[in-house]
Amino acid sequence: MTTLAIIGGTGLTQLSDLNIIKREELNTPYGSPSAEFVTGELNNTRIIFLARHGDPHSIAPHKINYRANIWGLKQLGVEQIIAVAAVGGITSEMIPAHIAIPDQIIDYSYGRKHTFFDDEAVTHIDFTYPYSQKLRSRLISAARDANIKVSPLGTYGCTQGPRLETAAEIQRMEKDGCDLVGMTGMPEAALAKELDIEYAAISVVANWAAGKTAGEITMAEIERHLHKGMANTAELLKAFVG
Ligand code: HPA
């Protein structure tokens, strides 16, 4: 059986429907992962859960040890990852609390340890399609079966954070073709590809991106929309594994 992992982001530090079997602390050649790896059963399917920002949520996007997280999952035999993350909505379909299954990435982050191929012979992985088409299709069908509306396509722009963007930065990202903006999609997706792990993302819109509405983005607004979006995400994950 294929070993599946779910990486939870802001708003999904724990999976409440997971029947926990064990928790493992791992060390890796790249340092410590964000949290313990939690093995459990979700809808009768065994999965491994990892809280990307730690549990409790305490690690900022630019400080996450993405290499240790992905290496740890590989060590545990993980072959597929569904990565859940909060995002800002840029294009008109990406309204707060909505879910998208992105198909493309533009990386604006910098200074992150973004490869396992630092010291060895130079290796260039193909990254034309950063997400697993197979996992994306399965997520989209599971959403249809569970009656959850999702956008089946979208370009995810990864910013450095932890601050949110300026209105001009979002305008530029929209011109570049981004539909969504988040802070954690990279280098996570590329590291998974380097280790030959299938990877797809569930992007949960927490707010309109900067400049898309009058006024400032508040944490209260983000929390409110995430609450709703993550409830749908939990249902989607159950349908996906079932
Ligand atoms: N920008 C970047 N990351 C985010 C946002 C945003 O507006 N909302 C949630 N994560």
Image (cartoon, rainbow, N blue to C red):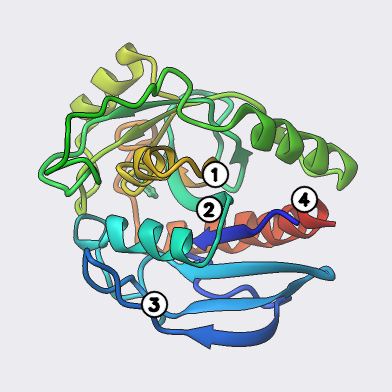
Q: Residue at x 27, y 25 (%)?
A: 124
The spot of residue 17 in percent (x, y) is 73, 76
User: Viewed as shown, does residue 108 lie left or right of 40?
Assistant: left
Residue depicted at x 44% and y 80%: 36
Earlier in the chain: of badge 1 and badge 2, it is 2
Q: Is residue 151 visible?
A: no
Say which mark, if any, is on residue 84: 2
**How many numbered discs, if any?**
4
Residue 240 marker: 4
Q: Amino acid at mark 2?
A: Val
73 over 117 or under it: above or below: below
Instruction: Categorize mark 2 by other alpha carbons within 10 Å: few (<14), some (14-19), many (20+).
Output: many
- For the residues bearing labels 3 and 2, Cβ distance under 8 angstroms: no
Q: Residues within 10 Å of mark 1 (few under 14, many from 20)?
A: many
Disc 2 to disc 4, how far (Cα)? Answer: 13 Å
Q: Tell me the amino acid under the disc marked 1.
A: Pro
Quadrant where the C terminus sits is bottom right
> Vertical placement of 137 versus 3: above or below?
above
Which image quadrant for residue 63? Answer: bottom left
* Ligand 1 closer than 8 Å to label 3 CB: no
Report if residue 239 is visible in the image: yes
| Quarter the N terminus occupies | bottom right
Q: Earlier in the sequence, mark 1 or mark 3?
A: 3
Q: Where is residue 182? Give x, y as percent.
A: 36, 43
Is there CB contact under 8 Å for labels 2 and 4?
no
Mark in front: 1 vs 4 = 4
Give the Cα separation between the discs numbered 3 and 4.
24 Å
Q: Which residue is mark 3?
A: 35
Identity, as a three-letter code, of the amino acid under mark 4: Phe
Kindly indicate whether the residue at mark 2 contacts the one at mark 1 (C-beta within 8 angstroms). no
